[in-house]
C-alpha cells in the first residue's frame, strides 16, 4: 500500500477498533490472547497494555531483548501524546517530510514513531491508554496489535489489514 493508503487504512483501524469499556479484566484477556498467539507463532515480543501510566499487562517472550521494553516505552509516549497509533504518527510525519525530533518539541529518546503502539479508545470517552508490542519489524508489530484487538472485539481482522508496503 502507498503511504496515503496506509494512513487512511490506519485511521480506519483506529475508528473501528474502539472499546465500549476497558478494565483490568479486559487487559488480562487481551494480553493473554496476544501472548498465546505470539508464543504459537514464535514471535519474540514484549507486550504492554496500560491505562494512562498504569500498567495492566506486561510480558516478555523468549527472544525479546532488553531493548524491547524501551521501544515499548517510547511508542506508548507517542500514542499518548498524539492519541493515534505510533505507526500512523510515523507515516504522517514521513508523508509531510517533517523530522520527528527536537525541532518539533519531540525528543527521540522518549518518543518513537514506529509501529506497535495502538490507542485504547473508549466510545464516548476518548483515548485512555494503549496496547503496545515490540519485537519484529514495525509494520508487523502494528499488524499484530490490530489483529489481536479486532479478534478481542469479535471483529474479522482481514478487512483491516494493511497489506504489503509500497511507496
Image (cartoon, rainbow, N blue to C red):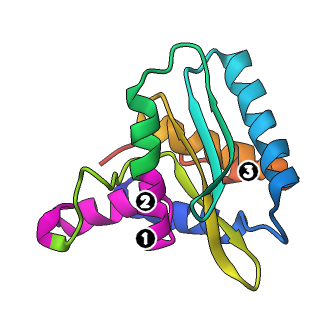
- At horizontal 53% and vertical 61% (from top left) the residue drawn is 10
Residue 147: in magenta span: no
Q: Nearer the viewer, mark 1 or mark 3?
A: 1
| Quarter of image, res 57 | top right
Mark 1 or mark 3: whose residue is earlier in sequence: 1
- At horizontal 80% and vertical 35% (from top left) the residue drawn is 33
Judged by its main secondary structure, the magenta piece is helix
Q: Is residue 64 visible?
A: yes
Separation (CA) of disc 1 from disc 3:
21 Å
Magenta segment range? 75-103
Q: Secondary structure at mark 2?
A: helix
Q: Nearer the viewer, residue 52 or 17?
A: 52
Q: Determine which residue is flagged by label 1.
A: 81
Separation (CA) of disc 1 from disc 2:
6 Å
Residue 78, position in %: x, y? 41, 61
Residue 147, position in %: x, y? 69, 44
Q: Determine which residue is flagged by label 2.
A: 77
Report whether 147 appears left or right of 85. right
Residue 40, position in %: x, y? 73, 17
Residues marked 1 and 2 touching at CB (< 8 Å): yes
Q: Secondary structure at mark 1?
A: helix
- At horizontal 70% and vertical 18% (from top left) the residue drawn is 39
Q: Determine which residue is flagged by label 3.
A: 149
Separation (CA) of disc 3 from disc 2:
20 Å
Report whether 101 appears left or right of 110. left
Q: Is residue 163 visible?
A: no
Q: Secondary structure at mark 3?
A: helix
Q: Residues within 10 Å of mark 2 (few under 14, many from 20)?
A: many
Amino acid at each position: 500500500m502507498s503511504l496515503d493508503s496506509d494512513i487512511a487504512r490506519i485511521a480506519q483501524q483506529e475508528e473501528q477498533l474502539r472499546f465500549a469499556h476497558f478494565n483490568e479484566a479486559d487487559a488480562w484477556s487481551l494480553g493473554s490472547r496476544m501472548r498465546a498467539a505470539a508464543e504459537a507463532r514464535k514471535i519474540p515480543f514484549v507486550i504492554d497494555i496500560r491505562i494512562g501510566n498504569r500498567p495492566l499487562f506486561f510480558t516478555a517472550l523468549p527472544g525479546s531483548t532488553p531493548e524491547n521494553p524501551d521501544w515499548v516505552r517510547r511508542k506508548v509516549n507517542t500514542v499518548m501524546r498524539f492519541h493515534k497509533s505510533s505507526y500512523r504518527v510515523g507515516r504522517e510525519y514521513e508523508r509531510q517530510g517533517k523530522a520527528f525530533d527536537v525541532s518539533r518539541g519531540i525528543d527521540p529518546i522518549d518518543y518513537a514513531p514506529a509501529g506497535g503502539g495502538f490507542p485504547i479508545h473508549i466510545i464516548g470517552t476518548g483515548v485512555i491508554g494503549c496496547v503496545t508490542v515490540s519485537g519484529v519489524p514495525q509494520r508487523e508489530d502494528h499488524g499484530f496489535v490490530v489483529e489481536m484487538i479486532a479478534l478481542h472485539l469479535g471483529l474479522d481482522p482481514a478487512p483491516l489489514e494493511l497489506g504489503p508496503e509500497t511507496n
